[in-house]
Amino acid sequence: MNTISVSTRVVKAITATVAAVVLFISNPTATLANGGDHKKTATLNDEQVNVQYVGTKDNSVVFRVNFENPTAEKFWLIIKNDAGEVVYRKQFNDAHFSKSVYFQKEESDIHPTFVIRNGENEIVRQFAVNRTITENTVVTRL
């Protein structure tokens, strides 16, 4: 066998291998260039979520939900009723999210649950709204 033909075959094999590796690495489906499902979701912490009772307005109980989302990733705001049923669910991607939530005043106590979820992470805030009616009686002499 000729030495030149062997080295030519080796050079061709190495060139073909290098070309295949370069094509594989530069392919968007093999890298994160296409944004694939390789994206990690940021973890949530308690300091990012703030849910506060604001007061009452027009026969409603009002809460304010604030969420600091510096990466502006998609997240869900989920609100559940006393029975754990979802009464509100919407996706947002605001970096500084703020929303007022109104619950109609009920004759009985209500226990709303607020959930902020992104991917597998979630922060839960639960409240109990107790309604107390006070009656004032004034007697005057006529």
Image: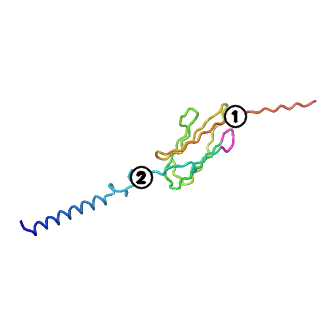
In the rendered structure, which amino acid carries the disc numbered 1? Arg
The secondary element bearing badge 2 is classed as loop
Q: Report the side of 45 relative to 11 (left or right).
A: right
Q: Label 2 neighbourhood size at 10 Å, few (<14), some (14-19), many (20+)? A: few
60 within the magenta span: yes
Q: Residue furthest bottom?
A: 4
- The mark that comes first in sequence, 2 or 1, is 2
If the image is split into quadrants, where does the N terminus sit? bottom left
Instruction: Give how far across and how far down residue 107 sits, in percent.
Output: 67, 31
Residue 137: image quadrant is top right
Colour basis: rainbow
> How far is mark 2 from mark 1, CA to CA?
46 Å
| Front residue of this view, candidates 55 and 52 | 52
Residue under pointer 1: 131
Is residue 81 placed above or below 117 in the rendered structure? above
Residue under pointer 2: 39
Residue at 10%, 67% (x, y): give it.
Answer: 5
Instruction: Give how far across and how far down residue 44 sits, in percent.
Output: 52, 49
The secondary element bearing badge 1 is classed as loop
Secondary structure mostly seen in the magenta stretch: strand
In the rendered structure, which amino acid carries the disc numbered 2? Lys
Instruction: Give how far across and how far down residue 104 sits, in percent.
Output: 64, 37
Instruction: Give how far across and how far down residue 125 sits, in percent.
Output: 58, 42
User: What is the span of residues highlighted in magenta in the rendered image?
Assistant: 53-61
If the image is split into quadrants, where does the C terminus sit? top right
Residue at 9%, 68% (x, y): give it.
Answer: 3
Q: Residue furthest left?
A: 1
Is residue 24 placed above or below 85 in the rendered structure? below
